[in-house]
């Protein structure tokens, strides 16, 4: 691999996990695809100064972005449902009438592997255009053992087609399929848990998730699933407090979850549980926006308790039909009042933590992977300010520069 030094750039290293960690006139030395050294160019150690040098022409370099919550493998779309919701039907009403997640389940079951893959690759390409190097993808639209496993196999195949790291999450506890409409506990045992064991044996599962909600699964059912995840040595995360307060985040924290996600209905007094467990709060402003939610996640309490806040797209056909992580950053500032600095930390270092990948991704620091995004701006605030457009000048992938 081409060991080299990148110069002529401003680096937002995110090295302390909280601030931009800006270095003007930076040099970043990479060896074997890893960061060997980063600092001010005049301080570059002499032995590294002998390496070939690539001048980035004054660009801003950040860690590659990390998409830590997506459902981007699915069949069909829900544009019709969107129109119905604008006409007054609520997300929960549509779900209870058999639409919502269940309609995507039908379309996903009907799609071939190639159709699922090709549709997913378009969304992956959108994320790559935002400087993303890692994408978490959940199952949850198959809702049978075979179909859930198929979703994760398709998700894993994306790595063969694009220069991207894929992390897969078992989310069979997403909705009840019609076959189990009256027997949720049987679904949990026969599909969620039995399937998890099989998918894990096939090496398909990096983490286990659930939808803890009135239209999803009860805390008692999620606990059953988490107990099995623990036996298997798999980390957990949870869709918690998106539409109501069932104390899912407290449950997630009890199991040392990597993350608790959504959290609009999280009570201030429950925030310390997340802090104590080191659980990342994943904020999903795309779903908040799309569902025209008015209740805000408890940002001040999360801040005050120093709970790391990640930002993700939640890319899915129902509640967050968007495939831009940068737009999620913009929305997190406009709708949730994150600072641009928090938004970038949320899409890099805290997102990496939400996937258990902090040792490899999320900041520009010696020993981490040399995966960076190179932007057409000098100011990192710009990334959370400009809506749309094409800001990415290039990507550094395994230490090699690829201009767009
Ligand atoms: N919460 C969400 O926002 C997505 N899943 C979940 O549990 C929505 C999934 C969908 O509507 O298709
Ligand atoms: Fe989600």
Image (cartoon, rainbow, N blue to C red):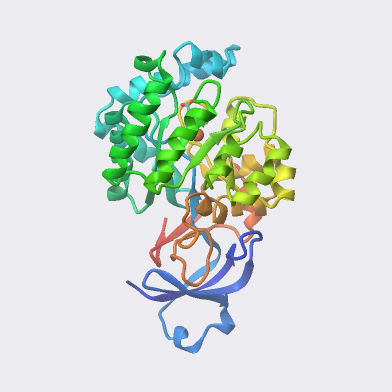
List the single residue furthest toward the bottom. 46
- Number of marks present in the image shown: 0
- Residue drawn at x 60%, y 74% is 25
The residue lying toward the viewer, choosing from 128 and 196, is 196
Residue 92, x across and y down, in percent: 55, 17
Relative to 56, 142 lies left or right = left
Residue 201, x across and y down, in percent: 27, 44
- Residue drawn at x 62%, y 32% is 247
Residue 104 visible in the picture:
no
- Residue drawn at x 28%, y 34% is 150
The residue lying toward the viewer, choosing from 368 and 380, is 368
Relative to 338, 243 lies left or right = left
| Corner quadrant of residue 379 | bottom right
Residue 290, x across and y down, in percent: 58, 27
Query: In this picture, is 128 found above or below 298?
Result: below
For the C terminus, give its image quadrant.
bottom left
Relative to 211, 77 lies left or right = left
For the N terminus, give its image quadrant.
bottom left
Residue 107 visible in the picture:
yes
| Corner quadrant of residue 123 | top left
The residue lying toward the viewer, choosing from 381 and 47, is 47
Query: In this picture, is 37 found above or below 237?
Result: below
Residue 106, x across and y down, in percent: 34, 19
The residue lying toward the viewer, choosing from 141 and 59, is 141
Query: In this picture, is 225 found above or below 207?
Result: above
């Amino acid at each position: 691999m081409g060991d080299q030094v990148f110069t002529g750039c401003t680096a937002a290293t995110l090295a302390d996990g909280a601030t931009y960690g800006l270095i003007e006139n930076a040099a970043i030395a990479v060896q074997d695809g890893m960061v060997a050294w980063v600092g001010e160019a005049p301080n570059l150690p002499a032995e590294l100064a002998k390496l070939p040098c690539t001048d980035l022409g004054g660009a801003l370099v950040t860690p590659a972005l990390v998409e830590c919550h997506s459902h981007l493998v699915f069949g069909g779309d829900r544009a019709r449902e969107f129109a119905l919701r604008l006409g007054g039907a609520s997300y929960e009403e549509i779900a209870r009438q058999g639409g919502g997640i269940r309609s995507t389940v039908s379309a996903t079951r009907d799609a071939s592997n190639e159709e699922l893959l090709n549709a997913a690759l378009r969304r992956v390409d959108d994320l790559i255009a935002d400087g993303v190097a890692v994408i978490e993808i959940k199952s949850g639209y198959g809702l049978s053992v075979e179909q859930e496993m198929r979703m994760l196999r398709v998700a894993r195949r994306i790595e063969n087609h694009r220069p991207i790291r894929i992390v897969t999450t078992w989310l069979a506890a997403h909705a009840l399929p019609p076959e189990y409409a009256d027997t949720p506990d049987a679904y949990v045992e026969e599909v969620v848990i039995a399937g998890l064991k099989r998918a894990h044996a096939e090496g398909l599962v990096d983490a286990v998730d659930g939808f803890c909600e009135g239209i999803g699964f009860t805390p008692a059912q999620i606990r059953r699933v988490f107990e099995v995840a623990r036996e298997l040595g798999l980390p957990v995360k949870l869709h918690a407090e998106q539409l109501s307060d069932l104390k899912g985040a407290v449950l997630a924290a009890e199991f040392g979850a990597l993350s608790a996600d959504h959290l609009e209905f999280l009570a201030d007094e429950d925030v310390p549980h997340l802090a104590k467990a080191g659980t990342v709060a994943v904020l999903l402003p795309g779903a908040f926006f799309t569902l025209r939610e008015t209740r805000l996640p408890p940002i001040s309490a999360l801040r005050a308790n120093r709970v790391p806040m990640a930002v993700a797209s939640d890319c899915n056909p129902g509640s967050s039909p968007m495939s831009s992580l940068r737009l999620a950053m913009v929305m997190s500032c406009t709708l949730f009042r994150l600072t641009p600095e928090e938004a970038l930390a949320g899409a890099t270092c805290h997102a990496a933590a939400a996937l258990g990948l902090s040792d490899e991704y999320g900041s520009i620091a010696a020993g981490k992977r040399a995966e960076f995004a190179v932007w057409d701006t000098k100011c990192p605030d710009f990334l959370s300010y400009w809506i749309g457009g094409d800001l990415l000048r290039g990507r550094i992938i395994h230490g090699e520069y690829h201009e767009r």
